[in-house]
Every structure is written in structure tokens, then in C-alpha cells.
Image: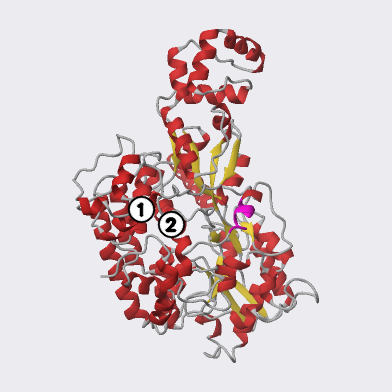
Amino acid sequence: MKYVRITYRSLLAAIAVYLLWPPSAQELPETSLESVLNRPVSDKAEVVIEFDPGNGYMPGTLPPTATGKLEGFLNVVKAFEARFPDTAVRFRQSSTGREWLVTQLSGGTAPDILNTNVENVWQDVHKGWYVPLDRFLDAPHPFVETEQPGSESWWDLFIYQAISRGKAAPDGKMYNLTYDMVETGILYNNTVLSLLGVSFPTTWSEMIAILGRIQENPFYKLAQDHSIVFPDDASGLADASKQYERPSLQMAFEQEGVLFPRTMPEWNTFRIIAERQTTIPMLTNEGSIADWGTDLLFDQLYYGILPGIDLKKDPIREQYLQGYLDWDEICFLNGKGFFTARDPRYRELYRILKEWRKYWNRTLSGGDQRGGIDLYKEFITQRGVFMWGTSGLVNRLQNDPDLAFDWQISYLPRFEAPEGVLDLLVDDYLATLPAEVNRPPVTFSSEMGRMSVDDFLRKVDQTSFPLPISPNTALYASGVEMCVIGGAATQYVVTNSAYNDTGDPSTSRKLQRVIQLLQFASLPEQADKVVNENPVNIPNVKGVPLTRGMAPFAEILERRYTTTKWMFTFDNRYNQVYRRMLLLYLEDGITLDEFMEWQTDNLSAAVQTIIRRKNLSFEGFEDQWMALEPVRNDMSGIPESE
């Protein structure tokens, strides 16, 4: 029996090993990630292309928004290989970190095509790591029929020209091919707004007023002060409605500005929010504010003075970007006092951010796995009412079985500057302020009182003599609608590995085939397989249909492009210091004055670094600056020169 037991156990162990032994590549399904990454190379292949499609489109993976493992780009590659039997494509799964990127590129081991954003590429264009795509984009698309989009120029195949062409690096060359688009937006609980009797705001002050009402949570107050019976299902709606016949309840709802619920979704939302004393008006995080928030507020405050400070107009990019400030312009303007503690617009940007911050979730740093909160979960459970998110959330929301309210998509509203305030004398301005605002911590001299508000903000040290400003106003607002701040999502670059067959781009057969793969993937019938398989981005190729729920984001993308992208301008050190200090400021760790001092020094160091590394030339800038002086003389908020 002893030997029988030993034999039996050995047999069980052998069976277990057999069952747990990983299958061979031949046994794995073609759509598994292992099979995708280990696709065999045909003996006929004379050209082998290494391709990193990016995490969002890597075949064999299963993103949380997809209904099955991705295979779109696998099918595109198979069709390309069928068209070019002498070519094989290997998929590479790359890291998203800059350290990996720099290591691979400097070592000559990067994939031939990879997905990376311009903020990575622009920093290294002088190193010869990337292939300029201009000559290919300007030429006819070889796979497009005559008189179809792209037949005269590959460029013509793309929908969002301003954003796509706007990705040209400051050296004037195009390295990033924008395959699809991502856009930010405000996803909001429309059921809550309906119960509050309001629509989505059209101005900043309207938005702040709505966020304030949400924060006060009148639903909780009504439920606490009155015995409201909530229906369990549709059969109880009639009895629930009869409660409103009580005059005291009618008066209470009217005083709180809340409409009485009529439908089950309205009742469910009312009950959920009434069960919590606190509700988060707007869900966001530190990354969104440091990136999108900074750029949007910057545009609102600086767009109006672009005619006086836009010093360089690229003949090609200008028609699409309409005044975009490149890194050399930012550096030059910084030397003139812009974007420093002496710049009243720059200070106002961060004052407004801090005022807005009180309506956000308490924790801003990190996701739910790093001590933060899951913004999406907070939204669908109706813990938060507004959520600053992207088009990548739409598919999840539409397929979420737990969603029990009406949600909509809109965009941040514009600022409106109070008319005539900047021209008022300080004494007259102070007299217009409410008592709770007009409490200067210091006494202004009679000379200061006779200065205009604009002169005071430009010439007087706000650390020593801060001028009180009413909350939620923007004295230097440009009065324009919010610009596009999202834009290019998947951005493909061609690395110097693409011509390692000859070492010369002009003679490389491999480079020609690499470009053909990108051209083939940008055909409408091929791009549709990829972008709409897991619809989280907006197509940028003409002829690719727009999937359900993406229309609002496509409309947002029709807006003009932002004035500048701060996170794309300087190096990683600047970005990291900026994000850390901004978060510290927003979390009351330092004052506005202390933050302005930090940021002025951080930007100054970044400017000096980029001038040295890029060997920037400011030739002609001073002449153009002087030529625009008459224009600036009629503008407010221009910092005083030292």
C-alpha cells in the first residue's frame, strides 16, 4: 500500500505539472499577448520592422474599457504584410517612462516606430534620434486614389489640422504623426443640475455659483429637516408625489432652490446625495490641474495680449496655431518680466486656481492605489457631481451597469473681466468692494490710492501691499471661450533605428517601408479597425466613423488651440518641481507669495537650461519687441521692465 500511495501521489503531481505547464507558442491563440510579441518572421522577409503601437492599441491586451482582447493593429499588420510579402512586422511593448525612452534611443535599440508625445521628442530633436516626417507628409499618399483626401498630400487625410500640424517642433520640423485625438471635458451629473433647476454654466462665475450650491448640499438639509418618504420603485411614485401637496414642504423646496423629484432617477439621486452631508462639487487631480488647468487659465489671461507679445510667426504653423508661444518666445518674454512674480497676469492665474481648489476633492495626489481616490468611482456613485476627465471615460460610462443617473459632457466656461475695473483709481476701486473683501492687511499710501488698479498691480510689490480682489473674478480675462487643451493622443514617431540598414535616411529601403506602414495604417478602413475597436479616442483620419458618445468631444476639438503648453516647453526637472510646488501651494503648505517666488526661480533656471542645451537664438526678437511697443502701450497687465 505504501508503494501504491507513492505512485498515486507521483501521478497526481505529474498531472498537476502537465496542467500548469505553460502552453507553447503554437498552442496559444493568435490574439494572446505572448503570441503577438513572438510572431514568427517569414523566411521571405527582407525588411523587419519593429513597431510599438502604444499601450492603448497593443494587440493581445485587454484594456478595462474593451469587450475583448485587442486585435485591430494585428489585423492591420497582417494586411500590410500580405501587400508587402518581403516585409515582417514585430510588435514591441515599450515602457512609457522617459528613462526607458532615452536609454533605448541613445543605445540605438529603440523600435522603428513608437508612440510617444511631443514633450518627450521636442527635448531631444537636436540629438538625431527621430526622423523628420515633413517630406512624407507633404507628398501624396501612395495608397490613396486620385481626388480622395490624401491624394495630393498625406496631410490632407487628417481631420484636425491645427492640432496635427501644431505638433511641429520649435525647430520647424514635424516628428510626431497624430493618429487619433483625446480631449478633456467636464462630465457632469445632469440629474443633479436638473433638480437644482440650472443648466450647465456658460461663464466662470456661474460655474462657481453652481459648485457652491452643490457644496452646501441642500438635498441633505431638506432630508434632515423634513420627513421625506422615498419611493422604492416606480409603483410608489404617485404616493411620493403627494408629499409635495404639503405647503411646508413646498416652501422648503422653494427656499432651497430645489425642484421636487418626479422620476425614479431623480428620486434615486436625491436620496443618494441626501444621505451624505458632504458632496464633492468637482472631481479632479493634481496632474490635470498642473497640466490642463495651468494652460487653460493661462490662455484665458494672456490670449488678449498676444498681438503685443507674439514675436515669431511661422508661415506654415501660424495659420493653424494662431499665435502659439514657442519655447524661444517664452524664454525671451521671461527676460522681459513675463511669467514672474512681477507679472500680474501670472499671479492672477494661481490666485484663481487656489480659489477654485476649495470645490475639488480633498486629496489631489495619486490614484486610489497610491493613497488617492478613484475619481471614476466617486462619479458613478454620485459622490461627486462634476468630473474633469477625458474622452477615454465615455465607453466605460456607457457600458457601466451601475450608472443610475443622466450624465452629460461639456467644457469649462469662459472668464468675464469686470468692465472698467483696471482703469479705476485704487481708492475708488476699494470703495466698490464688499466689506468682507475690502480688508487690506496693510494701509496704502495716498500715492498708491491715486494709481490705477492696473498700474498698482504692475508696479507695486503684491507681497508687501496685496490688493484685495473679489473671489472668482479675473481682472485680466481676455473674454474668449476656453480653447482646446486636449488634442493629440496616439503620436507615432520614427526613430533612427528605421534606417539602420544603411545608416543614411536618404538611401534606406527600410525607412521607406516603415513610412509605408504608417501610411497604410492611416487609411480610413485600417484606422477604423484600430481606433474604434476600443473607442476611447476620437479618430483623426477622414472617413473613420465617430462612435457613440464622442460627438461632444469632437465639437470641443473644433475650438482654437491653446496659447502654449507649459508641460511641453521645458525639461522634466522643471515639470517635476512645478508639480510638487503647485500641489504644496494648493494644499496650503505655502502661501501665494512663497509659491510665486519658487515658480519664478524654477522658471528662470529652466530658461537658462534650455537656452544652453538648445543653443537658442533670439535673432530678430528684440527688433520685433520694439516694433510691437505701440500695440502694448494700449494693453493692460504688461509687467514693468526692471
Which class describes the residues within 10 Å of circle 1: few (<14), some (14-19), or many (20+)? many
Q: Residue at x 58, y 36 (%)?
A: 199
Give the Cα separation between the discs numbered 2 and 1.
8 Å
For the question of whether residue 352 can be seen, the reply is: yes
Q: Is residue 359 magenta?
A: no
Q: Residue 362 location, x and y as percent? A: 35, 39
Q: Are marks 2 and 1 in contact (CB under 8 Å)?
A: yes
Q: Earlier in the sequence, mark 2 or mark 1?
A: 2
Identify the element where label 1 is drawn.
helix
Alpha-carbon neighbours of circle 2 within 10 Å: few (<14), some, or many (≥20)? Answer: many
Above/below status of 459 relative to 517: above
**Segment tinted magenta in the rendering:** 553-559
- In the rendered image, residue 68, in percent from the top left (x then y), is placed at 63, 50
- Mark 1, residue position: 348
Q: Which mark is residue 301?
A: 2
Instruction: Residue 140: give x, y in percent of width and height.
Output: 71, 80
Residue 319 lies, with reference to residue 255, above or below; the image says: below
User: Where does residue 324 sit, x and y in percent of width and height?
Assistant: 49, 68
Looking at the figure, which quarter contains the C terminus?
Answer: bottom left
Within the image, what quadrant is residue 374 found in? top left
